[in-house]
Every structure is written in C-alpha cells, then in structure tokens.
Image (tube, rainbow, N blue to C red):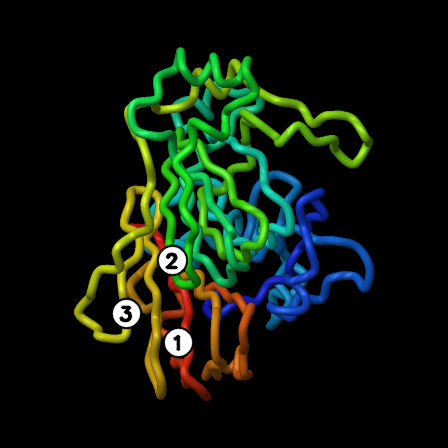
Amino acid sequence: MPLNYPLIFKPTFRDYIWGGRRLGTVLGKPIPETGDFAESWEVVDHGEDQSVVANGPLAGKTLGELVAEFPTDLFGNKSAGKTFPLLFKFLDANRDLSIQVHPDDAQGAKLDPPDLGKTEAWYILDAEPGSKVYVGLKEGVTREQLAQAVEANTVVDTMHVIEPQVGDCLFIPAKTTHALGKGLLVAEIQQASNTTFRLFDWNRAGADGKPRALHITESLETIDFDRGPVEPQEPQPTSDADINRLVTCDKFILDRWQFEGRKSIGGNQGFHIVAVLEGKIRTSHAQLDQALGKGSTFLIPAACGSVQLNAIEPTTLLDMYLP
C-alpha cells in the first residue's frame, strides 16, 4: 500500500533532571502520573530512538521503517538520505539546561559513531516571568577568553542573555553556544542528531549524585567564535496573510500559521511536520478525520498531497519542512 495519509506518532518521553510536568498539564501529553519529564519526542528517526505510527493501516511501523520502505512516498522530490532528517520535540525546562554546543555536519561525520550536525530552532510556548535563554557568546568573546572563563567558573558571564516572550522564535545554528533557562516551555525543530557538548552545567550533580560530564575540549573546538549574540527572529510575511516565515536555512523551513476557518496544507512534493500550538483543528482525511488540539503533532508524507484543515477555534500551528 502507498504511504499516502497523515501520520500521528506515539510520543516518547525523556525524564532528564531539568524536566517538569507541563508536557502533561499544558500540552496534554500522556506522561506517567509521577515523575518529572523534560522532553516529548514527537517525530524522530535516530538509531534506536524511533517514532511509532499510532493511526491507520501502518500503525506499529517505526519512522525508520517507513523511510526504508516508502522513501519516495515520504520525501517526494526532496532527497533526504537513508534516515528522516528532522526531529521535532516539546521541552519543559523546569530547571536551567546546561550551556552547550552542537557540531555541524562536517564535525558530526568525524564522530564515532558518525552523526548529523545539529542546527535547531526554538519556539517559545510559555515563559514564566524572568525566564531567560542563553543564546550565543557576547560580542567579541574569544576562544582564549572563554577558556579562561571555564577555569574561573564564569562561563555564564560570557553568554548573551535575553528574556524571551511567548511567540518568540530563536534560531540556533550548529556551533552556537546556547541554553534554555528554567520556566520555559518550548517547541523545537532540529536536525535528527543527539550530539551535545556540555560547556557548563551550573555546578550541579546528575541523578546519580555525581557531576554530569563536561566536554570542554570538544566545545572549544566546535564553537564558532565569529558568530556572536543571537536575537529573536523577525517574522517575515509570505504570500498568505495567515502565514509568517520564522526560519529559512539549508536544513529546514519553519512557518507559523495563525488562522480561522478552512485552509489546506502540504501538496508541494515534500513532507510537512505540523504541530498545533493553540486552538483546535479538524483534519479531513479518510485515515485522519478528527479534532486535534494544543500539543498535537502529525506528519504529512509527500504522497498524501494537501490536507484540509478546519480551525474549530482560532488556531496557531507550526509547519516544518525541507527547503
């Protein structure tokens, strides 16, 4: 059978030490009744980390299996290799994340085992008063100065810090130092990589009571010291008044839709990851005819063509796809 219908996947959860409960209380995710959960991986094909189809005749298949069996149906004319190239997740930062950096593709290819680089973008869903993001080094910080800051335990003083607002989008290219601060609920689109070099972890212990590993040498070798501070993206208008372009890069395109009534999405010979951030929509398709509210995510394969959406109430969603 062809892969020609919108796919909903079972979310998988990560209980990292900085997580909270908002994946359940705000986004409606079926997290366990006890414990803190940091991330909900919505769409992933990365080694053993696999999204599993929850609807339609392909229920039970992993995303990796779909890539292998239906590459043309899934990707259309967007060549994407042997794995699904993007990973989409929600993050609940109940504590500060480590200040970290990710390699680019060239650096990731040299790892053992090799991995993609990790360029990513954050969309702020909720922000407690005073919540911060640490995005890029301050202007003019050199490798030598950062190395000295590591020794002096003053890495935070080298970071560009802003207090983001709900609706802000931060674009974090590979090789950029960054960290989410406590109090933020975020949607993240990224390359399908899980390689992270920790530069600073707030002098805290991990779940085992021991300090978490740092990667000082790797971080200093990875950081692009010419990049400087990162500021929120300026939304760009498109030919559709309901759609703003938030990010365009060589790894993905990120659009924000804010609409009422009926619209169609997809149908451009490539896949689309769609995430509902506010409101509620109803999809009209034989294998996905249901209402989807805040926190819902689905994947439209290229062979599916366009999908009709009816906003039951004013709706904000993210549309993510390959350039």
Q: Secondary structure at mark 3?
A: strand
Tell me where residue 210 sits by quadrant: top right
Which sits earlier in the primary sequence, circle 2 or circle 3? 2
Q: Residue at x 69, y 44 (%)?
A: 16
Q: Position of residue 245 (x, y in %)?
A: 27, 60
Q: CA distance from mark 2 to mark 1?
A: 27 Å
Q: Which mark is residue 243?
A: 3
Instruction: Describe the element under mark 1 as helix, strand or loop.
Output: strand
> Which residue appears farthest toward the left when viewing the image?
239
From the image, tell me which residue sits under label 2: 168
Q: Secondary structure at mark 2?
A: loop
Count of labels shown?
3
- Disc 2 crowd rating (10 Å Cα; few below 14, some 14-19, many 20+) is some
At a point 67% along the width and 54% down the height, the residue shown is: 12
Q: Is residue 259 above or below residue 212?
A: below
Disc number placed over residue 307 in the picture, else none: 1
Give the alpha-carbon distance from disc 1 to disc 3, as whole Å: 16 Å
Q: Residue at x 48, y 63 (%)?
A: 299
Q: CA distance from mark 2 to mark 3?
A: 15 Å
